[in-house]
Image (spheres, rainbow, N blue to C red):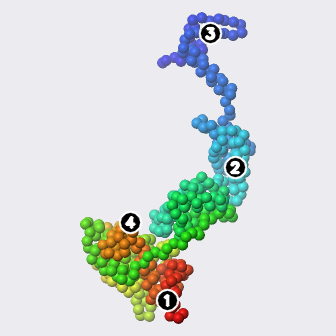
C-alpha cells in the first residue's frame, strides 16, 4: 500500500531545533504540497460560515447545500390536534444570511396564517396551477367525459397564459398585468382577437382560477382580475344553401365508393354518414358525433307516431334530440355496413342497446379528423371555393340545420333545446332570419 506523506514521515535534508519552535527546511515537493493543503484546511475551519441556523425555537431552519451558496428554508407546520407536523422546504433565493432570516420568518408567519384559513401553506406559481388544470382536462378526455372545447382551452393555456404568467402568483396579478398580457397576446396573434376568441381565453383563465380554489391553493375570497371578453364581433359562419347541401349529399353517395385504399374508402363512407347525421339532427360535429353509439338511439312514441330519439353529450352537457324521419334510412344503411349489426333489423338493434360506435371503421376505431377529406369532397363536387380558401366546414351543416328550421317556422325555444344552445345565442347569430320570419305578422 502506498504511504501518504505527513509532517513526520520524511527524511529532511537539514533542520534546526529551537526551544520555541521546530522549523523544517526541505526541498521535497510532496511535503511542501501537503503542508500547504494542511494550512489551507486550518484556514478554512477558521473562516467557514455556519451551514445550519435555527430560528423560532427550531421550527424554522436555514441551511445551505454543499453545491449552492444560497440559503434554503425549512419550517414545520404543526396541526391543531398533534405536536407532529409537516416540513415545508423552499429556497430563500439569497446568499445573505440576514436577508434569508427575514424571509424565512415572513414565509413561516404567512404559512401559519394560511393554515388557519384552511389553505395550502405555500402559494403555487401560475405555471404549477395551470399544469394541474391541464392535467384534469386531459384526464376527463381520456375517460370519455372531456368536452371538445378543452382542446382550445389547453392551447390557450400552454401557448399564451403560461408563457406570460408562469412565474407569477394568482394573488399578485393586477389589472395592469392583464392589460399588458392582452396587448402581448394580440401582438403574438398578429391581430386583434374576436369576441369568441376572447371568451375562450377568459374561460381557460377562469378554469385555472377554479383549479386553485378547488385544490385549496387560494381562497375564493381573494380577488383576481378577469380577462376582457370585449372584442371585434366575428363574422357569422357560412351555411350551405338547400341546393348545396342536396348536391353534396347526392355526390357523397357515389364518391364514397372511390378511393385508392380500403382505408380511404372507409373514411369517405364515414364522412357520408357523418354529413347525413349532422343534417338530420343538428348535433355538433366532434364530441357529439364521435361519442354517438347505437345504445344512445331509441324509438319515442307520441300520439301513435314513432320518432327517433337520440341521446348526445357535448359542449353544453347531455340532452335528447329528435331526428328527422329520413334518419331512419341513414341508420339502416349504417347498420348494414358492419357485420356485428347487419344481422339484426333496426328495431332489434335499437332494443339491444349495444355500446358500439355509430361512425367507425370496420375495426371499430374512428377517424382522428375528416376535415381534409371533407375539403376534398367539396372541391370534387364543385361546391364553394377551391381548397383551403373554402369557408364551408362540417360545422356549417349545423348552421344549415338551424337556418332551415327557423325559416320553416320552428319555435326558437324548441330549436334551442334541440341544438343544445341558448335562445340568446340563436338570436345573436340568426337575428336577420328571426326578423324575416316575423314579416308576415309585422306587415
Depth-wise, is mark 4 or mark 3 nearer the camera? 4
Depth-wise, is mark 2 or mark 1 nearer the camera? 1
What residue sits 60% from the left and 62% below the top? 209
**Which callout, 4 or 1, points at the residue further toward the start of the chain?**
4
Residue 75 percent coordinates (x, y)? 67, 46
**Which callout, 3 or 2, points at the residue further toward the start of the chain?**
3
Residue 56 percent coordinates (x, y)? 74, 44
**Which callout, 2 or 1, points at the residue further toward the start of the chain?**
2
Residue 27 occupies quadrant: top right
What residue sits 34% from the left and 82% below the top? 246
- Residue 368 shows which numbered tag? 4
Depth-wise, is mark 4 or mark 1 nearer the camera? 1
Left or right, residue 378 beside residue 132: left
* Label 2 – label 1 distance at C-alpha: 65 Å
What residue sits 54% from the left and 65% below the top? 192
* Label 4 – label 3 distance at C-alpha: 85 Å
Callout 3: SS: strand
- In contact (CB < 8 Å): disc 4 and disc 2: no
* Label 4 – label 2 distance at C-alpha: 49 Å
- In contact (CB < 8 Å): disc 1 and disc 3: no
Amino acid at each position: 500500500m502506498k504511504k501518504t506523506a505527513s509532517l513526520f514521515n520524511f527524511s529532511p535534508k537539514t533542520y534546526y531545533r529551537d526551544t520555541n519552535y521546530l522549523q523544517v527546511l526541505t526541498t521535497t515537493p510532496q511535503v511542501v504540497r501537503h503542508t500547504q493543503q494542511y494550512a489551507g484546511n486550518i484556514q478554512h475551519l477558521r473562516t467557514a460560515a455556519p451551514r445550519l441556523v435555527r430560528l423560532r425555537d427550531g421550527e424554522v431552519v436555514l441551511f445551505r447545500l454543499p453545491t449552492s451558496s444560497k440559503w434554503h428554508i425549512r419550517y414545520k407546520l404543526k396541526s391543531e390536534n398533534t405536536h407532529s407536523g409537516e416540513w415545508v422546504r423552499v429556497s430563500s433565493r439569497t446568499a445573505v444570511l440576514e436577508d434569508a432570516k427575514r424571509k424565512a420568518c415572513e414565509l413561516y408567519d404567512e404559512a401559519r396564517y394560511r393554515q388557519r384559513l384552511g389553505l395550502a401553506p405555500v402559494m403555487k406559481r401560475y405555471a404549477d396551477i395551470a399544469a394541474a388544470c391541464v392535467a384534469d382536462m386531459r384526464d376527463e378526455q381520456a375517460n370519455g367525459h372531456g368536452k371538445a372545447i378543452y382542446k382550445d382551452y389547453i392551447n390557450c393555456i400552454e401557448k399564451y397564459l403560461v408563457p406570460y404568467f408562469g412565474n407569477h402568483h394568482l394573488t399578485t396579478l393586477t389589472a395592469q398585468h392583464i392589460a399588458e398580457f392582452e396587448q402581448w397576446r394580440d401582438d403574438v396573434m398578429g391581430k386583434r382577437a374576436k369576441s369568441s376568441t376572447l371568451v375562450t381565453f377568459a374561460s381557460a383563465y377562469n378554469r385555472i382560477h377554479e383549479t386553485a380554489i378547488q385544490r385549496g391553493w387560494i381562497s375564493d375570497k381573494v380577488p383576481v382580475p378577469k380577462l376582457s371578453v370585449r372584442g371585434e364581433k366575428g363574422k357569422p359562419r357560412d351555411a350551405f344553401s338547400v341546393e348545396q347541401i342536396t348536391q353534396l349529399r347526392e355526390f357523397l353517395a357515389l364518391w364514397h365508393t372511390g378511393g385508392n385504399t380500403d382505408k380511404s374508402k372507409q373514411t369517405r363512407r364515414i364522412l357520408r354518414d357523418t354529413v347525413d347525421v349532422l343534417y338530420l339532427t343538428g348535433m355538433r360535429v366532434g364530441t357529439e358525433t364521435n361519442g354517438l353509439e347505437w345504445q344512445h338511439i331509441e324509438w319515442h312514441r307520441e300520439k301513435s307516431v314513432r320518432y327517433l330519439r337520440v341521446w348526445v353529450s357535448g359542449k353544453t352537457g347531455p340532452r335528447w334530440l329528435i331526428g328527422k324521419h329520413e334518419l331512419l334510412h341513414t341508420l339502416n344503411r349504417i347498420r348494414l355496413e358492419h357485420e356485428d349489426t347487419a344481422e339484426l333489423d333496426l328495431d332489434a338493434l335499437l332494443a339491444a342497446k349495444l355500446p358500439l360506435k355509430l361512425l367507425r371503421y370496420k375495426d371499430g376505431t374512428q377517424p382522428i379528423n375528416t376535415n381534409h377529406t371533407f375539403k376534398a369532397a367539396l372541391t370534387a363536387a364543385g361546391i364553394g371555393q377551391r381548397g383551403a380558401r373554402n369557408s364551408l366546414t362540417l360545422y356549417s351543416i349545423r348552421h344549415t340545420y338551424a337556418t332551415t328550421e327557423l325559416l320553416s317556422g320552428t319555435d326558437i325555444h324548441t330549436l334551442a333545446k334541440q341544438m343544445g344552445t341558448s335562445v340568446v345565442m340563436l338570436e345573436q347569430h340568426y337575428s336577420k332570419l328571426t326578423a324575416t320570419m316575423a314579416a308576415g305578422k309585422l306587415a
